[in-house]
Image (cartoon, rainbow, N blue to C red):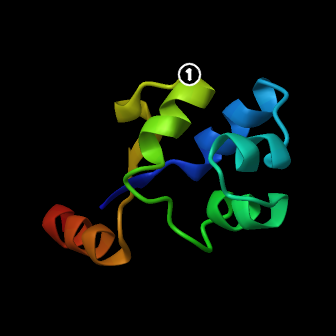
Amino acid sequence: MIELDLHLIKSRRIELKLTQQDMADYLDMGSKANYSRYESGKYAFDANTIPMLHKVLGIPITKLFTQKVTDSETEKSSEEVS
């Protein structure tokens, strides 16, 4: 399953010395609390926000995503090895 790498987004924001309020302002999200919900994964960034994340954080769009292995995929891999 491919998803946004929230850890990378947060790490890069901190590296650039940007606050959550700075990000909320750049992404037109209003408040720090609102942005925090996205960065923590409670809300999902939408397709229109991803290019803005790329621009603000200076991360190639393809690097913003990560492959997450689900439990069912892990179990399947274990069965194949057995």
Q: Give the class, few, some or many, for how many residues have Cα within 10 Å of label 1's Cα (few <14, many ≥20).
A: few
- Residue pushed farthest left? 80
Residue name at image x 81 percent, y 48 percent: 20
Name above or below for residue 23 compared with residue 55: below
Q: Amino acid at mark 1?
A: Gly
Quadrant of the rendered structure where residue 23 is?
Answer: top right
**Residue 62 location in percent, x, y?**
34, 33
**Residue 41 location in percent, x, y?**
60, 67
Q: Secondary structure at mark 1?
A: loop
Which residue is tagged 1? 58
Q: Nearer the viewer, residue 70 or 63?
A: 63
Name above or below for residue 81 compared with residue 61: below
**Residue 18 location in percent, x, y?**
81, 33
Image quadrant containing the C terminus: bottom left
Quadrant of the rendered structure where residue 69 is?
Answer: bottom left
The total number of labels drawn is: 1
Residue name at image x 62 percent, y 41 percent: 9
Image quadrant containing the N terminus: bottom left
Residue name at image x 35 percent, y 70 percent: 70
Q: Nearer the viewer, residue 71 or 22?
A: 22
Q: Nearer the viewer, residue 61 or 55?
A: 55
Residue name at image x 85 percent, y 41 percent: 19
